[in-house]
Amino acid sequence: MDFDPPETVKPLLDKIEKFVADVVMPAEGDILERGFAGAAPQLAALRRRCKEAGLWAPQLPKDLGGLGLGLVEHGLVSERLGRSPLGHYAFGAQAPDAGNMEILHRYGTPEQQATWLAPLATGAIRSCFSMTEPENPGSNPTILSCRAVRDGEHYVVDGHKWFTTSADGAAFAIVMAVTNPDAPPHARASMIIVPTDTPGFDRVRNIKIMGDEGSGWGSHAEIWYRGCRVPVTNRLGAEGAGFLIAQERLGPGRIHHCMRWIGICERVFDTTCRHITRRKIDDEKTLATRQIAQAWIAEARAEIEASRLMVLHAAWTIEKKGFAVAREQVSLIKFYVADVMLRLVDRAIQLHGALGITSDTVLAHYYVHERGARIYDGPDEVHKMVVAKRILARYS
Ligand SMILES: Cc1cc2nc3c(=O)[nH]c(=O)nc-3n(C[C@H](O)[C@H](O)[C@H](O)COP(=O)(O)OP(=O)(O)OC[C@H]3O[C@@H](n4cnc5c(N)ncnc54)[C@H](O)[C@@H]3O)c2cc1C
């Protein structure tokens, strides 16, 4: 077993690490202060530099202008991008576009690919994914009220969604809507592309996350779809195949998220080590001389290393044996790594004292904007239940 990153990607990983440290991180303060919509020119400049450096869209196939990396390789890249809140966006690898590009690449018709995938791949437009509804449990998405009713060669979409990430400024939404209400629960919904300039598309608001409504890519919207009429050719894949496609989207998506969270852990760890080795707690000694801080450092290091091994192993399993074989591993990493990340962020804030809750470090940004990690893509409790049921079934 070889634990070294593959020789083929080592130089690329070094280059990406350096680009994130030298170009992306220095831009953070200004961009996060302005917000994603307000900082559009600065973000565009970052992306231009990323393209010029030949680093654009590591996760995309080469024929779409990407670097054509496999899942394990992209996992390693994703960790490096995760060291900055702007990393994935600067490199064209950000959720929800990355997942949408993946399913458009796999299930899109040539016409859908030309209209939507090609401009997404270059970063000319953005997109969003609209499944969760305020009135229904997102943790059981077979329960959906949104309907897409066939009317000749069109669907008429009616529904109420929220937490549609990045809808603000997106060119289109991929909407999960019930097309076959009488089918079994997992075959009722379809994915339908709804351009955001369709009459009846109403982005009501950006929902405030712990007081911050965000903007542009960094936002989560509430949306009403009122009689949105789109051609039947806007359906992605077969009618009723929405959940099947969603599963495809979520498998690699969870690997990307987990590796991004490990990148966050490394950033938080580094920030904390720097702080406690400088912060004096009396005339001579720094915080780093205290056993409680040392224990935190050791525990955090162990948890990060364990997380990385688990996630890369899950990515390797998906790549070599398919998502069905990796299902249990993917559930394990989803709740385990999210928990490790949030504990690290919280402890880092504690060791920074009052400074930790200011916006003078990146910690408060993570505290607010990463708390959702234990909720989206399946809450902790659901993943734990899935894993436990599968394990216990082997004993019964
Ligand atoms: C930051 C963020 C971004 C998001 N982006 C998107 C997006 O782009 N598109 C989109 O469609 N959705 C998005 N979501 C929504 C997300 O998918 C849902 O929040 C998630 O599926 C949980 O659904 P819910 O919020 O309705 O919680 P509920 O389903 O109401 O569940 C509430 C809580 O109940 C508990 N629970 C639920 N089921 C069980 C169970 N079976 N056993 C035990 N406990 C249980 C869990 O603790 C859970 O957190 C996003 C959410 C967040 C936080």
Image: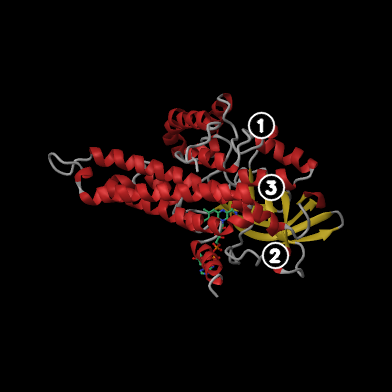
> Is there CB contact under 8 Å for labels 3 and 1?
no
Ligand 1, by image quadrant, is bottom right
Q: Which mark is residue 103?
A: 3
In percent of width and height, residue 86 lies at 49, 38
Kind of residue at disc 3: Ile
When the figure is inspected, residue 23 is found, relative to residue 348, above or below; the finding is above
As drawn, the residue found furthest toward the front would be 1
Give the left or right position of residue 372, taking residue 151 as reference.
Answer: left
The tag earlier along the polypeptide, 1 or 2, is 1
Q: Which mark is residue 138?
A: none
Q: Quadrant of residue 180?
A: bottom right
Along the viewing direction, whichever of 43 and 83 lies nearer the viewer: 83
Q: Counting other residues with Cα less than 10 Å from the Cα at mark 3, is it few (<14), some (14-19), or many (20 or more)?
A: some
Task: Say if mark 1 contacts mark 2, CB within 8 Å.
Answer: no
Question: What number is the disc on residue 65?
Answer: 1
Q: Nearer the viewer, residue 256 or 95?
A: 256
- Residue with the most extreme right position: 152
State if disc 2 and disc 3 touch (CB < 8 Å).
Answer: no
User: Quick one: label 1, few (<14), some, or many (20+) residues within 10 Å?
Assistant: some
* Quadrant of the rendered image containing residue 131: bottom right
Report how far apart the C-alphas of labels 3 and 1 lie in the structure. Answer: 16 Å
- Compared with 76, 291 (above or below) is below
Estimate the spatial distance between the alpha carbons at disc 1 and disc 2, rounded to whole Å. Answer: 34 Å
Q: Is residue 234 visible?
A: yes
| Mark 3 or 1, nearer chain start | 1
Element type at mark 2: helix
Residue 341 left/right relative to 90: left
